[in-house]
Image: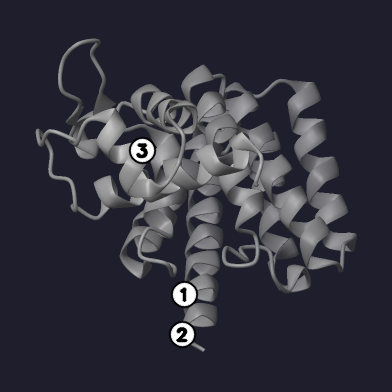
Amino acid sequence: MPPRALVSDHVFRTLLEAVLVGRYAPGEKLPTQRALAADLGVTMGSLREALKRLEQMGLVDVRHGDAMRVRDWREHGGLDVIAHLLFSSGGLDAGVLGDVLEARRLMLRELAALAALRANETQRARLHDLATAFAEVQDPEAAQALDFAFMTELAEAAGNVVFVLILNSIRALYFEHAAALQVAARPAELAPAYAEAAEAVARGDADRARAVLDGLAERQRERVEAALEK
């Protein structure tokens, strides 16, 4: 028999997919816990652990002595829903991926502009070092790690804690699905953009920093979408 944690995780993913794809509509009552457990062939303990995770994500409302109801994930969901939306249909959802890449582009270009206005000497030096390291890397996996480190340093230099926390929230998604989100593939072709962005930040040129990151993120979006079409 599989460990309860594995069973609970399977139940969680099964119920989460049902909520995200609309098999359970917002406001709809879920079956009783006993009925759900019987239908899924799991223990009450495993089911309750899965329901607790869904409740923590804001996707179900569980009240003692009352029916469980589904909540609208568009109103109550957070960043932790994104990874599941990307793969909720069993394959990569191109529409959701497009939204992710669009949001990434908008965020990064504004981070770069703010970093150019607010970065201190230490942060400018770190961006320069990361850009230099990116120019020397050949392994795509290492390049992916450097890309995220560069963007995280931009967020720190921008001096906005919300952006820092957003990047913390998507870190696991970024690396768990690195094979699908190959934003740093063929690093030699992208390296000049990192160097130019670091230089623009060092000069305090917000407009140039924004333009460079906007162009870099757009190139990366095109690469990812082209790779998926093959």
- Mark 2 lies on a secondary structure that is helix
Q: In the rendered structure, are the residues bearing label 3 and label 2 in contact, judged by CB atoms less than 8 Å apart?
A: no
- Mark 3 and mark 1 residues within 8 Å of each other at the beta carbon: no
Q: Earlier in the sequence, mark 3 or mark 1?
A: 3
- Badge 3: how crowded within 10 Å, few (<14), some, or many (20+)? some
Q: Amino acid at mark 2?
A: Glu
Task: Please say whether residue 139 is visible from this viewpoint.
Answer: yes
Asked whether the beta carbons under mark 1 and mark 2 sit within 8 Å of each other, the answer is yes
Q: Position of residue 48 (x, y in %)?
A: 42, 26
* Amino acid type shown at disc 1: Glu
Amino acid under disc 3: Ala
Mark 2 nearby-residue class (10 Å; few <14, some 14–19, many ≥20) = few
Quote the CA–CA distance across marks 3 and 2.
40 Å
Q: What residue lies at 34% left-to-right and 59% top-to-bottom?
A: 96
Q: CA distance from mark 1 to mark 2?
A: 6 Å
Q: Quadrant of residue 139?
A: bottom right
In this picture, residue 119 sits left or right of residue 101: right
The answer to which image quadrant residue 119 occupies is top right
Relative height, residue 50 to residue 189 (above, below):
above
Question: In which image quadrant can residue 93 be found?
Answer: bottom left
Query: Disc count in the image?
Result: 3
Residue that mark 2 sits on = 229
| Nearer to me, 214 or 74 | 74
Disc sitting over residue 37 in the figure: 3
Which residue has dot 1 on it? 225
Q: Residue furthest top?
A: 64
Question: Which tag is nearer the camera, tag 3 or tag 2?
Answer: 3
Compared with 64, 55 (above or below) is below
Mark 1 surroundings: few (<14), some (14-19) or many (≥20) residues within 10 A: some
- Identify the mark nearer the N-term, 3 or 2: 3
